[in-house]
Amino acid sequence: MHIALAVNHAGQQVPIDDLARFARRAEALGFDALLSGDHIVLPLEDQYDHPYSPDGRFGIDTHQPQGHLIESMTILGYLAGITDRIALGTSVMVLPYRNPVIAAKCWASLDVMSKGRAICGLGVGWSRWAFEAIGIPFEDRGAVTDEAIEVMRTLWSQAAPAFNGRFTTFDGIGFLPKPIQDPLPIWIGGQSRAAARRAARYAQCWHATRATPEQIAALIPEFREQVRAAGREPGEVMISLKRRLHLTDLGLDPGPDPFLPEEVVGTIDDVIADARRCRELGIEQLTYDFRTFEPDEQIAVIERLGEYLIPAVGSTSFANPRTSA
């Protein structure tokens, strides 16, 4: 079982020294990866289109410290310079927000600068208001994402890359550096059937989000058939689940929001039992984020996980999940 942690990328909420302290401690404790979220803009007024919120509210106030979100590749570049072994990625980058040639360059550069530790987590996005602000048609986001992944893989793998698609066309260009990892691992985020189909076709990992283990387990047989239909073996694609975690035996304030069914809430023994249950259901990787934004409290949580969870379920640092034990 691989264990990763979400990075709090709210720049005003988490001073850079605290981010460095969190990252270095996570690496020392043996976690596999640090994963950053990706938000370019936030709404000034409440929006009700959030797919992972009970009432649809986004729940982050742009004017509050947690609304000051650092761009994801900038965070990962910084973390690459202060860590040595832990993998670094996104959970997930909204790929349609970015030109795919530039995105491919960013990811290849990160993989080189981190000495082969990049995890390219990608998703289609859900916030219509963000797409409108960036100038990308919301309705095209799935098709844009699929083509962009093909563009990136072409640039990463071909000596003289050429591409002729609906949204992107090029030839007669050079693209260097190539990523160190071959392939640079792609994780596709989301728990929908469309996300699973995209992961089956393109990815090294299906990175499901905000779902219960049982919900993901119910989709695994269909997912494995989709992998086979894409001409691949199910073992080539890792199954991952990201959920929010609250440890009840640390005395931390859980905040005002109600607990959701997909959250992991309980003592460290409960968390270990949940991780073992996930492994039995076929989930191979777990990513945790936190109810608390406080750096010291987050570090207290990962200290407890590092002391008890990692020895109990096993965790080996990796960049490309298919090359690690």
Image (cartoon, grey):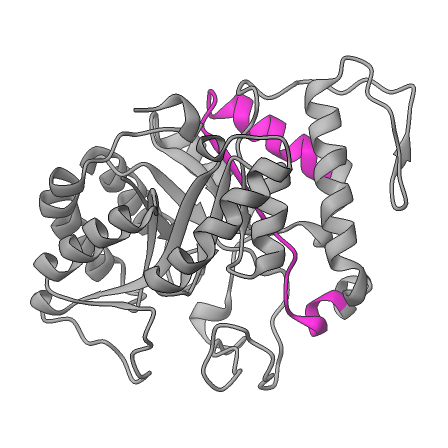
* Left/right of residue 146 with respect to residue 2 in the rendered view: right
Q: Position of residue 137 (x, y in %)?
A: 82, 64
Q: Which residues are magenta?
A: 102-131
Q: Can you see residue 11? A: no
Above or below for 18 versus 185: below
Above or below for 134 versus 321: below
* In magenta stretch: residue 106: yes
Above or below for 238 versus 111: below
Q: Position of residue 259 (x, y in %)?
A: 29, 79
* Left/right of residue 23 with respect to residue 228 in the rendered view: left
Please give the name of the residue rendered at 78% of the width and 69% of the height, measured from the top-left corner. 132
Examine the image and state in which quarter residue 120 appears.
top right
Q: Position of residue 193 (x, y in %)?
A: 58, 59
Q: Position of residue 189 (x, y in %)?
A: 53, 52
Please give the name of the residue rendered at 52% of the width and 51% of the height, measured from the top-left corner. 222
User: Is residue 253 or residue 17 the one in the foreground?
Assistant: 253
The C terminus sits in image quarter: top left
Examine the image and state in which quarter residue 168 appears.
top right
* Left/right of residue 42 with respect to residue 69 in the rendered view: right
Q: How many marks?
A: 0
Q: Residue lying at the far top in this picture: please name it.
A: 159
* In magenta stretch: residue 228: no
The N terminus sits in image quarter: top left
Q: Can you see residue 264? A: yes
User: Is residue 108 or residue 143 the one in the foreground?
Assistant: 143
* Left/right of residue 241 with respect to residue 109 in the rendered view: left
Above or below for 230 versus 70: above
Please give the name of the residue rendered at 60% of the width and 33% of the height, measured from the top-left corner. 107
Please give the name of the residue rendered at 78% of the width and 43% of the height, measured from the top-left corner. 147
